[in-house]
Amino acid sequence: MERIKIHLPETFSFSTKIIIRITDINYGGHVGNDTFLSLAHEARQQFLQHHGYEELNIKGYGLIIADAGIEYKHELKHKDEIIISVAAANFDKVSFDLFYKIELIKNEEKILAGKIKTGMILFDYTNNKKISLPEEIISKLKS
């Protein structure tokens, strides 16, 4: 079976620390696939706020996820401390990719726990249509 392979950028412009909550744990006793995407959602919102935006207000427009991929590398459990790094790349006329590197901090060492990619589209919710990415947004998110 062919597996998803996510090729992360070499550099990340933003990172945030998160502690895994008991509500993040599934019946298998670890963080499940739905929570990996929820963790990416939180990191994405913080990344956007860092650049002066919000998911539903980027120069008056919003973002929608066109696709998502997760590559699991290490189990996460309750009370684990993680760092999620975020980078924007692959910009085209109306879309771009966000990459998330999730690392477990254990004994002062970082262990890669997962890689996520979400394809993002700038969207005008009022007129229900895709919007071309202004250069100002591209420039901000790349930094």
Image (cartoon, rainbow, N blue to C red):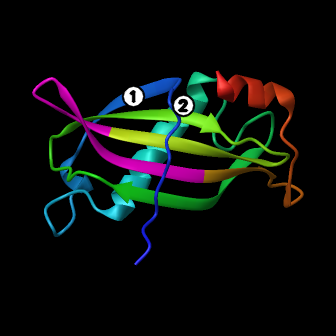
Mark sitting on residue 75: none
Left/right of residue 103 with respect to residue 127 in the rendered view: left
Where, quadrant-wise, is the C terminus in this rendering?
top right
* Mark 1, secondary structure of its residue: strand
Q: Can residue 63 be seen in this view?
A: yes
The residue sitting at 37% across, 54% down in the picture is 36
Identity of the amino acid at label 2?
A: Phe
* Mark 2, secondary structure of its residue: helix
- Where does the magenta region start and end? 103-118
| Corner quadrant of residue 32 | bottom left
Asked if labels 1 and 2 touch by Cβ distance under 8 angstroms, the answer is yes
Residue 136 picture location, percent across and down:
82, 25
Residue 19 picture location, percent across and down:
24, 37
The residue sitting at 74% across, 36% down in the picture is 58
The residue sitting at 42% across, 52% down in the picture is 38
Q: Distance between the residues labelled 2 and 1?
A: 9 Å
7 or 42, which is in the foreground?
7
Left/right of residue 15 with respect to residue 54 in the rendered view: left
Would you place residue 30 above or below residue 96 in this image?
Answer: below
Residue on which disc 1 sits: 16
Q: Is residue 47 magenta?
A: no
Residue 53 picture location, percent across and down:
66, 30
Residue on which disc 2 sits: 47
Would you place residue 91 above or below residue 48 in this image?
Answer: below
Q: Residue furthest front?
A: 2
**Mark 2 burial class by Cα count in 10 Å: few <14, some 14-19, many 20+:** many
Would you place residue 66 above or below residue 22 in this image?
Answer: below
Q: How many marks?
A: 2
Left/right of residue 24 with respect to residue 124 in the rendered view: left
